[in-house]
Amino acid sequence: MGIRKVLLLTYHFPPSGAVAVYRMLGLVSYLPKFGWQPVVVAPPCVPWEPEDPSLLAQVPPDTPIERVPFASGFAGKIARYFAPEAHWLYQAWPASQRMIAEHRPDAVITSSPPGCVHRLGLWVQRKFNMPWLACFRDPWITNSAIKDWTLHRRYERRLERKVIRHANRLIANTPINLQGWANAYPEHVGKMLTITNGYDPERFARTTNASPRNASRFSRPQDGRRVRSVRRDFETRFERSSPFDRTDSLWRCDRPDASRRYSAARSYTRTGAWRAGQAV
């Protein structure tokens, strides 16, 4: 049997510099070794997230990619205001249909967050009767720490139930998330599985002249690529808008020492302490 194709629908793909990109890079790099060629539909960038063009070099050159930009112009500003992420779906849907017509994939993968991307999986499955794998890199509603049941969250809870019911496979990123699903949706536990985040061992190979650091101190070595991405995420979110003047739960600040902690974190990343593996 020749190589089969799988449609990958995601908000995060190089040159995005967000941490979520590394799971997508793993899929496009390793799935061909198992007989599956990914066909990608993704934005060229996410306006509020960092970019790292160097990550494009890690994408296999024969990977078909359809770039679907976020809405722009005056109408785009209105769309982004009312539906910052979800409005992208209505431009990604025609692109997904074009990629299906051209490449004839045998299955579709949707990868969240944001959870709204799974609506594309529902649409593809409904129209093309295609096997669908819904991958959750983070909790959506089940297992989420956010408990403020706004109208939008209530809608997302209904959408999550629909995704759980219709997806052929449900992929959790941790055993804890899988257990939360099993408790919330026991009738669908047979199609749930866990695929944790991984890493490439060759990127962490020790040098022959490596020597242990002071064992009396706690150190936390990091993958520099990922720390730089986390740093960019962190600084982009906090420098473009004050964390103390927003009302939604992502930005709400109830800790009196939050300003001091934020300053300390910025200092830790900007001074390069993480490169030296200094104690936290």
Image (cartoon, rainbow, N blue to C red):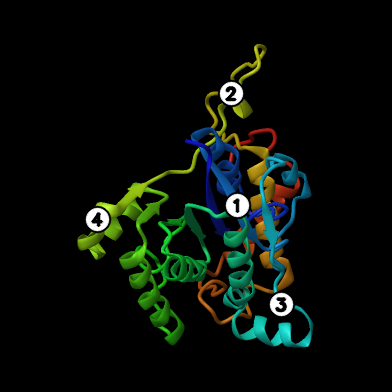
> Disc number at residue 214?
2
Nearest to N terminus: mark 2 or mark 3: 3
> Does dot 3 land on a helix, a strand or a loop?
loop
Q: Residue at x 66, y 17 (%)?
A: 207
- The residue tagged 3 is 71
Q: Quadrant of residue 33?
A: top right
Nearest to N terminus: mark 3 or mark 1: 1
Q: Residue at x 78, y 49 (%)?
A: 53
Which amino acid type is marked by label 3? Ala
What is the distance, in whole Å, between disc 3 and disc 4 at their CAs? 38 Å
In the image, residue 41 lies at what x, y percent? 62, 60
- The residue tagged 1 is 39
- The residue tagged 4 is 189
What is the distance, in whole Å, between disc 2 and disc 1 at their CAs? 47 Å
What is the distance, in whole Å, between disc 3 and disc 1 at their CAs? 22 Å
4 or 2: mark nearer the eye: 4
**33 with respect to 48 (left or right):** left
2 or 1: mark nearer the eye: 1
Q: Is residue 110 above or below residue 155?
A: above
In the image, residue 91 lies at what x, y percent? 64, 74
Nearest to N terminus: mark 2 or mark 1: 1
Q: From the viewer's side, name the closer residue of 218 and 93.
A: 93
